[in-house]
Amino acid sequence: MEVILYIAAIIAAIGFLILCVSVGMTLFSLKSILSSLSGTLSGIEGQMEGVTRETTSLLSKTNSLAEDIQHKSEQLNSVVQAVKGIGDSVNGLNNSVQQITSSVSKSVEQNEEKIAQVVQWSNVAMGIADKWKKRKIIEQETVSEDVYGFETVQVEKPKRKWGRK
């Protein structure tokens, strides 16, 4: 029975040896995988530093753009208020023109008879002025001198007509 005990010990030793060899092979293969993983992590770390720098730069530019937009928005607000003021002024001017127009139309309505009389009198005055001019022209045509100045020819004046045309 001792032999069986030795054989069992040898089989156990061979099994332990196979276990150790397989664990060693697994650890060696795991070592290459871990070194590859370590290199990958180093590359990712470098990339993360670059991303962090770019993110910081981008955040700085975003902040400066936000400040610029805020400044321009404030300027635009003042322009909008100025345009609103102009619109209010135009509305006030329109109201003033409407008031003046209504007062002028009321005055015209109130003085309609007087305006009609003024128009009639001005027509009469213009008629008299036209007749006066025609009379002057006729008087100038009626008196004509001879080219040599020997005699003056007197032409009879036409009779006046006292009516309107």
Image (cartoon, rainbow, N blue to C red):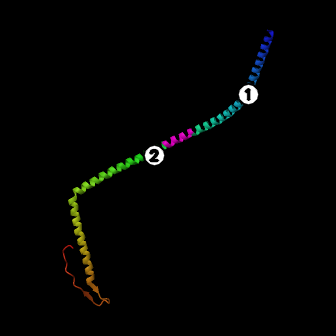
Res. 15 mark? none
Residue type indicated by callout 1: Ser
Instruction: Using a 10 Å C-alpha cutoff, classify the residue at mark 1 as few (fewer than 14 neighbours), some (14 to 19) or many (20 or more).
Output: few
* Left or right: 29 in relation to 130: right
In the image shown, does 132 or 41 lie closer to the viewer?
41
Residue at which label 2 appears: 79
Rendering quarter of residue 34 = top right
Can you say whether 40 is above or below 80 in the image?
Answer: above
Point out residue 81 in the picture as x, y percentages from the top left corner.
43, 44
Residue type indicated by callout 2: Val
* Left or right: 29 in relation to 126: right
Can you say whether 144 is above or below 62 in the image?
Answer: below
Q: Is residue 105 magenta?
A: no
- Marks 1 and 2 sit apart, C-alpha to C-alpha, by 73 Å
Point out residue 84 in the picture as x, y percentages from the top left corner.
41, 46
> Which residue lies at the image location 35% right of the left edge and 50% below the top edge?
93
Which residues make up the magenta segment? 62-73
Q: Callout 1: helix, strand or loop?
A: helix
> Which residue lies at the image location 79% right of the left edge and 14% below the top edge?
7
